[in-house]
Amino acid sequence: MTNLAIANIRHRKLRSSLAAIGVMIGIASLITMLSLSHGTLDEVARRIEGIDADLIVLPSKSSLIFSEGAPLSDKYIEKIKSVKINNHELVADVYPVYLAIMPSMAGQQQRVFGIRKSDFKIFTRSRKIIAGSIFDDAFARYINKLRNSVNGNYQPEKISRKLLQSACQLVIDERLAKAGHYSVGDKISFLGQQFIICGIVESGGAARVFAPIEVIRFIQNGGINWSSLFFIKLKKQLRNACEHSASEENVIEQAANAIRKKVHLRIVPLSSYNNMLFESFKPIYIYINMASGLVLLVSFLFVMVTIYTIVLERRKEIGILRSMGADSLYILKQTIGEAMIISLFGTVSGIIVSYIARWAIETYRPLLTVDIQNRWLILAITVGTLGALISALYPGIKAIREDPVAALNYE
């Protein structure tokens, strides 16, 4: 049967090839779109979840995904640190972050993490500086000295432009540096100032761009100690203080509840960031699934039309087979066999094309991540197989209903 199906396909090479190309386009689109959307967001989630912290503090009803500016006063930090469970302190440290948006860097919008120099290793998991150095904290020390002076002599408008300009420094990750061909010493326009790239760090940190938090605060809100969010590192001994602490998740949740009651803010476990990201971009996934489904539907309609046309053209051959004793099951298998071969060829070609697409995307848009996972390949093969079966059913039923006598007289 297989040999006969292959022979039939070879007899109509162009039509069969076009049908296979249709399947190839559908499968390649499915794999590439899913791998690109999930891969890019998963890469962002992995970077955030790699921060050496346990909890995220946000204003109520806000989103870590879209938040920026400075809605949280640093006065909350002392309140958070004072929280206890069973007279045991919970918090090892609190790391403030000021989020700002850089409109374009390497052709893509970048989220800048304004952080303290002392917290740099927390947000990069001690990744190495491969060029230059971390930004200095001379400006932060100067501002703090003014705040703590006897006179309370801190007046933002009297800070010299020269001092501010010398503190406008950025550390970017290696992947961004390669994508934008940046090097240490390059100047980037940001927040109305010229920032200098002072260092390049290995990829994988929480952000692609880091800046001194005091500088961002000064430019954005006159240096007032407000932040976009906090990251909380819990004490290792916390497990002993919590009740029913059989799992780490349970301990973290108990700590989050205790802190939430104290400060009345949104406290989220860092490990749930991936779910937050997915929920925030859920409408995009719905669109991607609908688009992929539409492309696949058109592809397999093309296969069905091709097989149906072949059946119509072979009415006489089908009649001969029926008159020679071929039963309905044999005819149906023949039709399904042709559809399966076309779809199998299209599916395999689509998988190959998706890998080519991944190479092209990551070469020309290196900040995007196309993560082709086994689940997408299994989904593609399943869709290709089921699509072939479904698309062959109507032509197959049409074939087995042919009257042998009428088919033999067909010209």
Image (cartoon, grey):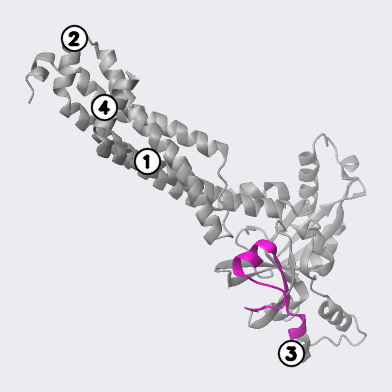
Instruction: Count neighbours of disc 2 (C-alpha within 10 A) and say few if under 14, some if 14 to 19, many if 20 or more.
Output: few
- From the viewer's perspective, is the residue at label 4 or at label 3 nearer? 4
Indicate which disc, 1 or 3, sits on the residue closer to the N terminus. 3
Residue named by callout 4: 8
Of badges 4 and 1, the one in the foreground is 4
Q: Secondary structure at mark 4?
A: helix
Callout 4–callout 3 Cβ contact below 8 Å:
no
**Does any portion of residue 269 appear in the rendered image?**
no
Q: CA distance from mark 2 to mark 1?
A: 38 Å
Residue type marked 2: Met
Q: Earlier in the sequence, mark 2 or mark 4?
A: 4
Disc 2/disc 4 C-alpha distance (Å)? 19 Å
Three-letter amino acid code at disc 3? Arg
Q: Which residue is mark 1?
A: 296
Q: Which residues are magenta?
A: 165-190
Please identify the quarter of the rendering in which residue 306 is found.
top left
